[in-house]
């Protein structure tokens, strides 16, 4: 039965089949039976990565297979969400080694996007922590791969957008925590130069993230708030919290109504939001101890956050530029503030070294900006692409819905990646709208 | 061995079976999972043990192998405090009309097999003067309809059996609850376009079932509208009903 499918950005929307499976043998039948497919988890990539004429949902394949509470090793089927994993591991004193800004994605999705977090410099991307995983190939063979066994399959599956096969089982290492609280410090930066020097000053922090007001011009250009954080230890907690140091956060949520008129987001409302966001931090520096949820998963507290941009959808433009290319970063930020096209939360992070073939992360600055879909947006993003290419930057496939294949040229191992996909899926059965658009998969003869 | 009560899940590979098993586990019941192919429920077993920190064991059970049922129940240690009967099949009704083997299989799974195992459980519970049985029937059993010819009649028989069993067991303090789901979003219904407002997720079904069980309800519909929809359907006069496409 066909239905309308879309991902977090609500762009594009396509009509497609979505099938589910609970057992391995059901998946085998689907994989051999469907002519073309892509695996799909929570559908929280932003663009068209998890869209294809047939999608195979992993959401019912969500069982926990083992959890070594002494060594901190967790093994599960790929459709389980990070939220469910946290519910089990946090009370036992463990945390995800790497987490993106939402806990609603699946473990399979975390591998396929090779997600990074606010601790990329110290902990790398998610796949650095994988012990081994199973990948079901399009030809119906299940392979267990790791850094040592089928390393080419392993490398190409980490960040490979699901194009090597269906990730079915993942075994990975966790991070030890003493409490489920976070000790954070927020520091205001008046402008871009101050921000860059703050980055230097706090380079040793485990978690670093910056909210930046991309609509500011002139001497306030680059006005921002830098947040640095560590997992709190018992001594950081007050008496109340110390009674239950590994508590789980509650799940109070707000919901954005289904009909949000497109004009709610305009330059004025974004400016007002940014003003308040900056002004609420009246002091130059604020320190506090909070539960992990509001620190890592701010927007998960609002159901259907993506509705805020209206029913035309939006695209998120997330790119990384090499550390030395601060000129490029400034040039992009200036273009955005000049155009007055920006979003509520523009997030800047520092990434460490690249560790796998096709993953987005590489050493540099990464910026993520939302753009509601309206007239001129795609043309404008093409202009930003030019600046990026010039400075050696690249775009995160998980967020992309619109770029041209040429934009992949700053992924140095692209050709190797393509050849590995071809090796493990010679018939080209696994493909997404994105992989076709970016010519990652062989041109379809349909 | 824990001090927890134990629930037996007959039909633990279905989406509904999985949801009910998890619900009872989250309420700190130890869980016995039974399915035709016990290798398929190993992942669910580890999942339940790790998530809910209760004991979980697996058994192979074939609803159609009636002769094996006594030995199966005999082999359960400890004996379950609650037996939940979930297994059932729904084949295409046109196929079942043309091929009696299919119709027979549907009747025997949904009705005969259920009677066979629940008789055994009920006798045990009556002797113990305690215990509970939960049977998953269907709104399709409330009135025979062309579109659910064999499935509906097998569920009608099962509903009648559960009613009778409740009556029989009452004096021994054994509770029997009949659950009548309407549309549920499962693998079984994945290919059907179902009206969203009338369709329950398996997790919701499990929540409603568990709550109703703690309140010792007799018959429970999942999503309240179904009680009234079926009330209307049951009250349409036959001379009119027979002309309708339902």
Image: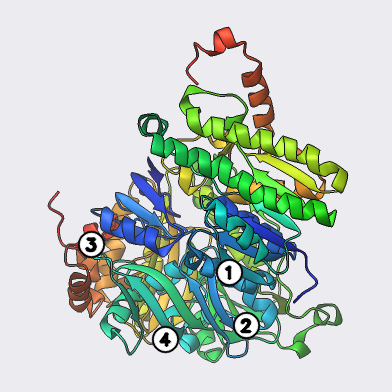
Report the label total: 4
Look at 54% across and 31% down and name the residue there: B152
Return the mark for residue B45: 1
Return the mark for residue A94: 2
Q: Calculate the distance from the C-alpha at mark 3 to the C-alpha at mark 4.
A: 26 Å
Q: Are marks 3 and 1 on the same chain?
A: no
Look at 56% across and 51% down and name the residue there: B66
Q: Please name whichever residue, A140 or A146, is drawn nearer the observer in this view of the structure.
A: A140
The quarter of the picture where residue A323 lies is bottom left
User: Residue A95: in sight, yes or no?
Assistant: yes
Farthest residue, direction left: A445
- Provide the secondary structure element on which disc 1 rests: helix
Q: Calculate the distance from the C-alpha at mark 2 to the C-alpha at mark 3.
A: 38 Å
- Labels 2, 3: front one: 2
- Labels 2, 1: front one: 1
Looking at marks 2 and 4 on the same chain, the residue that comes earlier in the sequence is marked by 2
Residue highlighted by disc 4: A352
Q: Around disc 2, counting alpha carbons within 10 Å, would you say few (fewer than 14), some (14 to 19), or many (20 or more)? A: many
x and y percentages locating residue A280 in the rendered image? 69, 66
Return the mark for residue A438: 3
């Amino acid at each position: 039965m066909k239905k309308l499918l879309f991902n977090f950005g609500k762009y594009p929307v396509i009509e497609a089949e979505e099938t589910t499976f609970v057992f391995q043998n059901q998946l085998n039948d689907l994989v051999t039976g469907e002519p073309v497919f892509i695996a799909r988890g929570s559908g929280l990539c932003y663009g068209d990565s998890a869209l294809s004429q047939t999608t195979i949902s992993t959401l019912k394949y969500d069982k926990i297979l083992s959890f070594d509470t002494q060594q901190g090793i967790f093994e599960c089927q790929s459709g389980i969400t990070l939220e469910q994993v946290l519910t089990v591991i946090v009370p036992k004193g463990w945390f995800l080694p790497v987490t993106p800004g939402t806990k609603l994605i699946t473990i399979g999705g975390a591998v396929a996007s090779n997600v990074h977090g606010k601790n990329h410099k110290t902990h790398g991307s998610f796949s650095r922590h994988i012990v081994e995983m199973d990948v079901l190939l399009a030809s119906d063979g299940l392979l267990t791969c790791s850094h040592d066994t089928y390393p080419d399959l392993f490398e190409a599956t980490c960040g490979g957008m699901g194009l090597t096969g269906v990730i079915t089982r993942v075994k990975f290492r966790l991070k030890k925590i003493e409490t489920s609280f976070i000790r954070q410090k927020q520091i205001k930066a008046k402008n871009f130069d101050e921000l860059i020097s703050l980055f230097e000053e706090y380079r040793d922090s485990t978690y670093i993230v910056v909210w930046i007001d991309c609509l500011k011009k002139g001497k306030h250009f680059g006005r921002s708030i830098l947040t640095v954080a560590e997992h709190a230890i018992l001594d950081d907690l007050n008496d109340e919290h110390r009674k239950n140091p590994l508590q789980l956060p509650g799940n109070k949520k707000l919901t954005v109504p289904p009909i949000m008129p497109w004009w709610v987001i305009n330059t004025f409302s974004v400016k007002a939001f940014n003003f308040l966001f900056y002004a609420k931090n009246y002091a130059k520096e604020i320190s506090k101890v909070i539960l992990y949820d509001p620190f890592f998963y701010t927007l998960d507290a609002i159901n259907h956050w993506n509705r805020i941009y209206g029913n035309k959808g939006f695209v998120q433009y997330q790119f990384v530029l090499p550390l030395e290319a601060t000129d490029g970063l400034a040039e992009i930020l200036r273009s955005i503030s000049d155009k007055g096209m920006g979003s509520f939360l523009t997030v800047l992070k520092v990434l460490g070294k690249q560790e796998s073939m096709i993953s987005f992360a590489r050493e540099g600055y990464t910026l993520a900006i939302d753009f509601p879909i309206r007239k001129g947006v795609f043309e404008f993003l093409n202009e930003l692409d030019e600046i990026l290419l010039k400075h050696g930057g690249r775009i995160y496939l998980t967020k992309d819905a619109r770029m041209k294949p040429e934009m992949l040229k700053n992924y140095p191992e692209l050709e190797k990646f393509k050849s590995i996909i071809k090796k493990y899926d010679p018939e080209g059965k696994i493909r997404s709208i994105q992989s076709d658009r970016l010519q990652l998969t062989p041109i379809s003869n349909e | 061995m824990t001090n927890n009560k134990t629930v037996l899940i007959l039909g633990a590979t279905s989406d509904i079976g999985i949801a009910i098993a998890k619900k009872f586990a989250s309420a700190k019941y130890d869980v016995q999972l039974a399915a035709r192919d016990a290798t398929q429920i190993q992942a669910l077993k580890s999942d339940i043990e790790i998530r809910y920190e209760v004991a979980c064991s697996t058994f192979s059970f074939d609803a159609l192998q009636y002769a094996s049922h006594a030995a199966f129940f005999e082999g359960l240690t400890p004996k379950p405090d609650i037996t939940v009967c979930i297994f059932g099949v729904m084949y295409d009704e046109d196929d079942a009309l043309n091929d009696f083997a299919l119709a027979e299989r549907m009747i025997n799974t949904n009705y005969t097999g259920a009677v066979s195992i629940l008789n055994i459980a009920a006798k045990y519970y009556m002797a113990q003067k305690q215990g509970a049985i939960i049977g998953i029937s269907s709104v399709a059993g409330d009135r025979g309809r062309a579109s659910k010819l064999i499935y509906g009649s097998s569920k009608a028989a099962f509903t009648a059996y559960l009613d009778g069993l409740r009556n029989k067991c009452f004096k021994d303090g054994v509770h029997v609850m009949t659950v009548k789901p309407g549309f549920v979003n499962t693998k079984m219904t994945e290919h059907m376009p179902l009206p969203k407002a009338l369709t329950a997720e398996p997790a919701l079904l499990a929540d409603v079932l568990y709550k109703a069980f703690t309140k010792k309800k007799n018959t429970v519909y999942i999503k309240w509208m179904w009680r009234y929809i079926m009330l209307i359907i049951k009250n349409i006069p036959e001379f009119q009903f027979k002309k309708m496409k339902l």
